[in-house]
Image: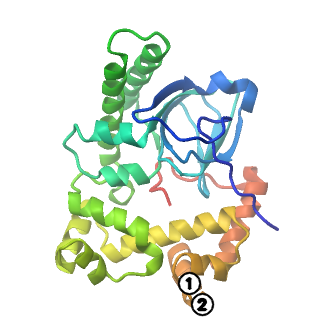
Amino acid sequence: MTAPLPPSYFIYGESSRPVELGYLHVERVSDRQQLHRGKVERHRHPHLHQLSLWHGNGGEYHVEGETHALTRDTLTWMPMGVIHGFDIAEESDAIVISISDTFLRAQLSQVSFGGHEQLVHDPAVIALDPSDAGQFRHYFESAAREYAFPGMFQETALGALTQLALVSLVRVAQGRERSQRIPVRATPLFEQFLALVAQHFAERWGIEHYAGRLATTPYKLNQVCLAATGLRPSDLIRKHVVQEAKRLLLFTALDAAQVGFSVGYEDAAHFGRMFSRATGLSPGAWRADQWRHMAHPSQRPLAAAHPEGA
């Protein structure tokens, strides 16, 4: 049994292509109803981040290997490259704001919170409280109107509305369990560490090596990671390795030993023990379980509404 690789799109249904600097696009899921008819296959956007606000009831949202219930006022944040898809009822819809990485970073650079890199990399599915939902509906509906009926300074207006939505996302995330939230006490050192992990995790660097590359000490690196997430640097590296391993197990036909080698483990048994400690299942058992639920989604228990993105 093999799992197909998920396709890549620019906007759903459009062939992947380079994105312009400062790109922003707003549309409703129902705008492409004739294309997907409520069932969007798992896919990824290599060059775009997507922030969506859902209304109506009925449906499931798939993020990597997790499935989440879509209810009224569910907020989804999908960084570029994250594998996602959904199955929705006819009455369900969403406003989707798609933005380039340059646009995202330009907006984040104008606000004072830290944790930019965490927001850039970690997906989220959040069932909003009624006290928060009205504010998000205002931002999204205003953005949709501005995009459809542009006035003077449209780019500035859309940037301001998107920035407010992103800041509100961070605020809402603060109220979630610490291990599931976007860190807001992060520093540039923490963000640089996450970027290095994403680039070099498969090389199995030690903490001393990361600290040396960042011109700091292991003690200091440990302190900033604990302050930002409650996790040690080694925990964050392992979390990234497990997430990448899950992607390869779920969406490629590589065997467990090949997956382990791809994420930096030459010894298949060592990789298997690490993966089992993190997930409770061997790589093969985890893959079989995920593929079984993908083939029979109605038998799959729904995940919590605000994942950490693993």
Residue highlighted by disc 1: 271
Q: Position of residue 96 (x, y in %)?
A: 52, 30
In the displayed structure image, the side of residue 223 where residue 252 appears, left or right: right
Residue 239 sits above or below residue 277 on the image: above
Residue at the (71%, 67%) spot, across then down: 289
In the displayed structure image, the side of residue 132 where residue 214 appears, left or right: left
Q: Amino acid at mark 1?
A: Phe
Residue at the (27%, 83%) spot, across then down: 208
Q: Nearer the viewer, residue 99 or 16?
A: 16
Q: Position of residue 99 (x, y in %)?
A: 45, 35
Residue 299 sits above or below residue 278 on the image: above
* Marks 1,2: beta carbons within 8 A: yes
Rate crowding at label 1 as few (under 14), some (14 to 19) or many (20 or more) other CA atoms within 10 Å: many
Q: Amino acid at mark 2?
A: Ala
Q: Position of residue 194 (x, y in %)?
A: 34, 63
Q: Nearer the viewer, residue 44 or 56?
A: 44
Residue 139 sits above or below residue 212 on the image: above
Q: Residue furthest right?
A: 1
Residue highlighted by disc 2: 269
Q: CA distance from mark 1 to mark 2?
A: 5 Å
Q: Is residue 37 visible?
A: no
Q: Position of residue 151 (x, y in %)?
A: 38, 9
Rate crowding at label 2 as few (under 14), some (14 to 19) or many (20 or more) other CA atoms within 10 Å: few
Q: Is residue 26 visible?
A: yes
Residue at the (55%, 89%) spot, across then down: 270
In the displayed structure image, the side of residue 124 where residue 260 appears, left or right: right
What is the secondary structure assignment of the residue under circle 1? helix
What is the secondary structure assignment of the residue under circle 2? helix
